[in-house]
Image (spheres, rainbow, N blue to C red):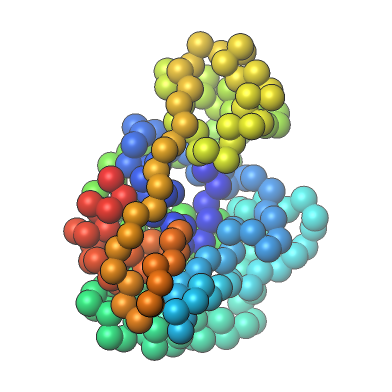
Amino acid sequence: MQPTFLPWSGYFNLMASVDVFVFLDDAQFQKGSWHNRNRIPLNGKPHWLTVPVKHNTLSQSILQTEINMQSLWREKMVRQLQQVYARHPFSSELMAFTDVINDTSYISLAELNIALIQMVSNRIDINCQMLRSSELKIKGVRTERLLAMLNAISATHYLSPQGAESYLTADGFSQQSEVSLAYQTFEPQYYPQKKSTDFIPKLSILDVVMNMGWHGAKTYIK
């Protein structure tokens, strides 16, 4: 999976369902994607949180994408999160997120995203082995690259996000490999969202934690 910014609960459900999880940190960065933004509720509606980045080349990877260090986005984002979640049941847990966001040692977008994902994973007891595609040094594109990656880690089963089903089918994944293929079936369920009249699905995992705490988030994603 590509390391996205403060991903939704389904991302962690997939992580909790596998033995080995690979961050596709050398995937191409896509402007306007989940790579550098995600959603929280504001005044009962979804609101985007965005990490400003430098666009050096069209083909730059998430790992190569640098965070804009000149902007005061960290202070603004932390202040907004504190305002939004000040009266939530588990607002005291916000510091775990803001400590990572405020860490200026993260220059690469991928490094920041992975740090946040690993922090959440540790707190909700996700124990899968985590690898990075940039370290595996696998060549190829799409299914060809995926199969090479699965072979490199000696995988026997592959759990895919639902969104990849069309291209895996088109590329003939099952015809090219003996690896067992299954698709994630996680669907977001209702949880009480403070200050929201209507339930807003697929918000950042941050919102789940603020409303349900770490133990509640652990139960929710599994």
> Is 9 on the left or on the right of 161, as rendered?
left
Q: How many marks?
A: 0
Residue at the image point whose x is 38% and y is 77% from the top: 196
x and y percent of residue 23 in the render? 50, 44
Residue at the image point whose x is 47% and y is 31% from the top: 183
- Residue 64 seen anywhere in this rendered image of the structure: no
In front here: 166 or 51? 166
x and y percent of residue 24 in the render? 56, 43
- Residue 110 seen anywhere in this rendered image of the structure: yes
x and y percent of residue 171 in the render? 68, 23
Residue at the image point whose x is 35% and y is 81% from the top: 195
Q: Is residue 22 above or below residue 65?
A: above
In front here: 138 or 159? 159
Taking the view exactly as shown, the residue that stands out farthest to the right is 58
Q: Is residue 133 above or below residue 199?
A: above
- Image quadrant in which you'd find residue 166: top right
In front here: 95 or 187? 187
x and y percent of residue 40 in the render? 46, 72
> Is 75 on the left or on the right of 92, as rendered?
right
> Is 143 on the left or on the right of 47, as rendered?
right
Taking the view exactly as shown, the residue that stands out farthest to the front is 198
Q: Quadrant of the C terminus?
A: top left
- Image quadrant in which you'd find residue 87: bottom left
- Image quadrant in which you'd find residue 134: top right
Residue at the image point whose x is 65% and y is 18% from the top: 172
